Amino acid sequence: MGKEFNVIQVGLGPMGKLITNLLIKRKNINLRGAIDINPVVVGQNLSEFLDIKDKSEIIIHSNLEKVLTKEKVDVIVIATSSSLDKVAPLIKHAVKSGSNIISICEELSYPFEYYPQLSSELDDLAKSHNVSIVGTGINPGYLMDLLPIVISAPCQEVKSIRVTRMMNSAKRRESFQRKIGTGLTIEEFHQKISNKEITGHVGLTQSIQMIVAALGLEYDEISEFPPKEIISEKEFTTSYGEIVPKGYVCGLQSKAIAKYRDMDIIFLDFVAYAGEHEEFDSVGIEGIPNIHQKIIGGIHGDIGTAAMVVNLIPRIMEAKIGLLTMKDLPVPCYTGHIWKNRS
Ligand SMILES: NC(=O)c1ccc[n+]([C@@H]2O[C@H](COP(=O)([O-])OP(=O)(O)OC[C@H]3O[C@@H](n4cnc5c(N)ncnc54)[C@H](OP(=O)(O)O)[C@@H]3O)[C@@H](O)[C@H]2O)c1
């Protein structure tokens, strides 16, 4: 058996909490610090904040830089925002301390097209400090990009790829339900989407960019369509106690397509709304052979995202250095029994 991986968690919102709980549970991981800027949580004992019995000496700090001056860790996990502009300053501080970065920032999952200059800056910085940076999560990061990439491996030819994620958003965290417009009127939904008060799902374009890069596919354009609201057919109460009347928004559908010579070569269909409908994740490849894979019941996005992050910790230590994406890492898998410096 080798040693434990030393890790700091940044961001203790609903996702950060789930990740931190898993970090604490994993025997091959030693959580060294927890950071969040929310003044309500700063200064609290981490175990009390997480409401777990396992007593921790860790006090939640507001400033990553100050924590980093005390010690260097193997990996810093960042779960603060979907926007790379907002996350980049944290990444830079963390990389300068000599730590690898795993973030669930959706825009980091494939940043090269939207942020070419910042991407090359982060790549240079990571290389000069001998570390790796990667954006991951369940989606983007796995279901609608890495999974279809891997499923295409036994194909002699790939003509098109279609990925569908169909989920019951009522089972997801409150922040997710809110960002897909749950409980809004149709007018409020369109207004909040257009003035970016809510984001809907972020990452479909990045997922397509990762697939075309991995498979080397030629394409003319990638289009992501504005999210379309889904309307509740009956009144219901959300998991956080809000009543959503019939006729109000209960979720959304988002689509993105890559076209080549008027053919849809990649089609991503993301559907999330509160309801009793079937949940699944499916990948269809038209090629030689045709492949149709379906995950019955789908994968719970919050549980899956926490696992993706924590399972990636041993993997990023074995990865090449620089700004990477999920397609560049050693094969991701469950890593609860992988130790540092294993022989
Ligand atoms: N890739 C994927 O599959 C995937 C899956 C799930 C979630 N995500 C993304 O992950 C992010 C986190 O999710 P969430 O629901 O936990 O979000 P959230 O509710 O916004 O929580 C983020 C937490 O980070 C804190 N924070 C913000 N900036 C910070 C900084 N510079 N330093 C330290 N802490 C900071 C926030 O404090 P304040 O509240 O005071 O700002 C808040 O406590 C979201 O952007 C979400 O879209 C991605």
Image: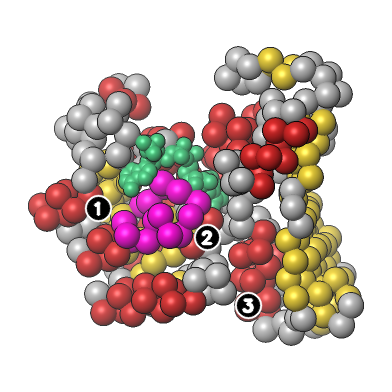
Circle 3 or circle 1, nearest the eye: 3
Give amino acid for label 2.
Answer: Glu
Residue at the spot of label 2: 107
Q: Is residue 168 left or right of residue 11?
A: right
- Tag 2 or tag 3, which sits nearer the N-term? 2
Q: Secondary structure at mark 2?
A: helix
Give amino acid for label 1.
Answer: Asn
Label 1 crowd bin: few (<14), some (14–19), many (20+), radius 10 Å? some
Circle 1 or circle 2, nearest the eye: 2
- Residue 299 lies, in percent from the top left, at 65, 43
Contact between marks 3 and 2 (CB within 8 A): the answer is no
Label 2 crowd bin: few (<14), some (14–19), many (20+), radius 10 Å? many
Residue at the spot of label 3: 214
**Ligand 1 image-quadrant field:** top left
Residue at the spot of label 1: 6
Span colored in magenta: 77-91
Residue that appears at 61% across and 45% down: 195
